[in-house]
Image (cartoon, helix red, strand yellow):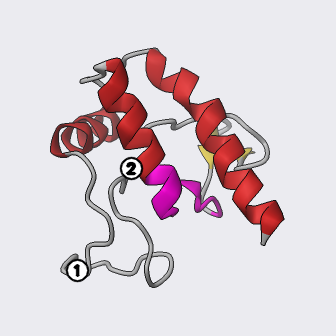
Amino acid sequence: MRNIKRKVNEEIERGYLGSDETCEYYPCHYKGQDCTFCYCPFYPCMDKRFGKEIRRRRGDTVWDCSPCLMIHDKDVARFICDRIEEEGITDADDLRIKDIFGQAAELYLSKDSSA
């Protein structure tokens, strides 16, 4: 979890990126994806619309959000960056990030239902 937070901090500091076709992993999900957040600033969101908790062989659980593409939607990524900047958030551990999740999720889900 510490490594995820470190990467999100780097992404927050860098700011909005958009699609990064120079990345060796592009496209890791779909062509045209937004690459601003390679690591989700909301992990683990624990929202069952975007993932599920799974039990590993050793008995502990982990949040699996592998099917979630919300963070790679260009409008959602731009919205999150704008809100992070407006709030003056500079650290992934800032609890205000969790407040942004609900608004970002609604934006994403409303786009999906209007398609």
Q: Measuring from the top left, give residue 97's x and y in whole percent.
A: 46, 25
50 relative to 101 in the view: left or right: right
Q: Tell me the kind of residue under disc 1.
A: Glu
Q: Which residue is drawn at 38% across and 50% down?
A: 39
The relative height of residue 99 versus residue 103 in the rendered view (above or below) is above
Q: Quadrant of residue 66?
A: bottom right
> Which residue is under mark 2?
39
Residues packed near mark 1 inside 10 Å, few (<14), some (14 to 19) or many (20 plus): few
Mark 1–mark 2 CB contact (< 8 Å): no
Q: Measuring from the top left, give residue 19's x and y in whole percent.
A: 32, 72
Start-end of magenta stretch:
67-77
In the rendered image, the residue lying farthest to the top is 95
The relative height of residue 21 versus residue 55 in the rendered view (above or below) is below
Q: Residue at x 17, y 45 (%)?
A: 14
Q: In which quarter of the image is residue 4?
A: top left
Q: Tell me the kind of residue under disc 2.
A: Tyr
Q: Measuring from the top left, give residue 101's x and y in whole percent.
A: 58, 33
Quadrant containing the C terminus in the rendered view? bottom right
Q: Identify which residue, 59 or 39, lies in the foreground.
A: 39
The relative height of residue 20 versus residue 58 in the rendered view (above or below) is below
Q: In which quarter of the image is residue 9?
A: top left
99 relative to 105 in the view: left or right: left
At mark 1, the secondary structure is loop
Residues packed near mark 2 inside 10 Å, few (<14), some (14 to 19) or many (20 plus): some
**Residue 70 magenta-highlighted:** yes
Q: Which of marks 1 and 2 is nearer the N terminus?
A: 1
Q: Residue at x 49, y 75 (%)?
A: 29
> Which residue is under mark 1?
24
Q: Measuring from the top left, give residue 45's x and y in whole percent.
A: 61, 35
**Residue 91 magenta-highlighted:** no
Q: Identify which residue, 41 or 2, lies in the foreground.
A: 41
9 relative to 98 in the view: left or right: left
